[in-house]
Image: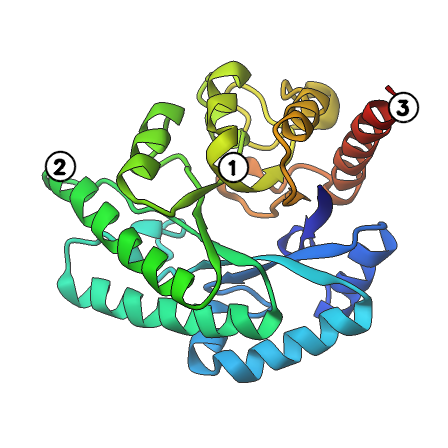
Amino acid sequence: MRLSCADYSFPLLPYDVNLALIKGLEFDAVDVAVFSGNPNNSAEDVIADPTGVGRQVKAMTDDAGLVVADVFPIVITDFRPVFDVQSAAPNNPSAEVRTKARDDFLRFIEFTLVLESPGLTILPGCSFEDSDPDRDWGLATEELAWRVEVAEGAGLELGFEPHIGSITETPEATAQFVAEVPGLKVCLDFAHFVYQGISQERIETLLPITRHHQVRQAADGVMQAISYEGTIDIKRLVRQLVAQGYEGFIAAEYVWMQKWACDRVDNLCETIYVRNEIREALADLSSD
């Protein structure tokens, strides 16, 4: 198991300083965000020139002494009143939007290959107002099955992040989604489930189908919590991952945005806290 850190925890820093900070915090890997409107490596820039931007990012991560653990693209075309992940969702009812989303995905694959990342994470799709839930689900499984085929053809792993507002808001729906899309894996962030009051035990049923982990503290009704207010047992998670032979990355992932009041946490200190929790759990296991 290797430790990574999300580059979107510190979005206001120049990117070279961002990466230097992550390396200075003694992480060996970085999760690279490709978000619409992101000041570093925006989705729009990557779509326009995936190889060119990829080479720039690869040179900077190499200079910082970091490997890329994961690439996380999110395209948004409507930011009102807050960013709307439905606007470019893979299962959008609009065939035109879905076609554009497939085209964008091919560019993200190209970018991911340049960075030599083992894979990438996407969002699964949403439920749409006045739409048939079965149709929303069916389009999502169809579109992600196509993406799995493309990713596997490029030698990449594909995961999706279950999140609030998606068609996979519960562990049970997430497991069902994976069962219907062979080859698809989960990028697991406990926070989206804990926020809803879902127990850690229910979330842990997803560990065997998870390819990448994002870790931060959270609590019932609190998407991103201060360490001493969080309810996630990080050491328990690490112990279970080791017991299951997990060999991927576990990433400290604090975000900085107004949504869910995620800009009210000291991302630097909380990142260090999560890192230390993971390290202590691994040290305890190695001394047993």
Task: Residue at 22%, 64% (x, y): give it.
Answer: 97
Residue 7 percent across, percent down from the top left: 66, 57
Viewer-proximal residue, 237 or 228?
237
Q: Which mark is residue 218?
A: none
| 228 horizontally vs 41: left or right | right
The amino acid beneath tag 3 is Ser
Judge whether 192 appears above or below 100 on screen: above
Judge whether 199 appears above or below 37 on screen: above
**Residue holding disc 1:** 188
| 264 horizontally vs 223: left or right | right
Q: Which mark is residue 287?
A: 3
Viewer-proximal residue, 107 or 126?
107
Viewer-proximal residue, 172 or 43?
172
Residue 14 percent across, percent down from the top left: 72, 69
User: In the structure shown, which secondary structural element does the residue marked by tag 3 occupy?
Assistant: helix
Q: Is residue 56 visible?
A: yes
| 58 horizontally vs 272: left or right | left
In three-dimensional space, the C-alpha distance between marks 2 and 1, rounded to whole angstroms, equals 24 Å
Q: Which mark is residue 134?
A: 2
The mark that comes first in sequence, 2 or 3, is 2
The mark that comes first in sequence, 2 or 1, is 2
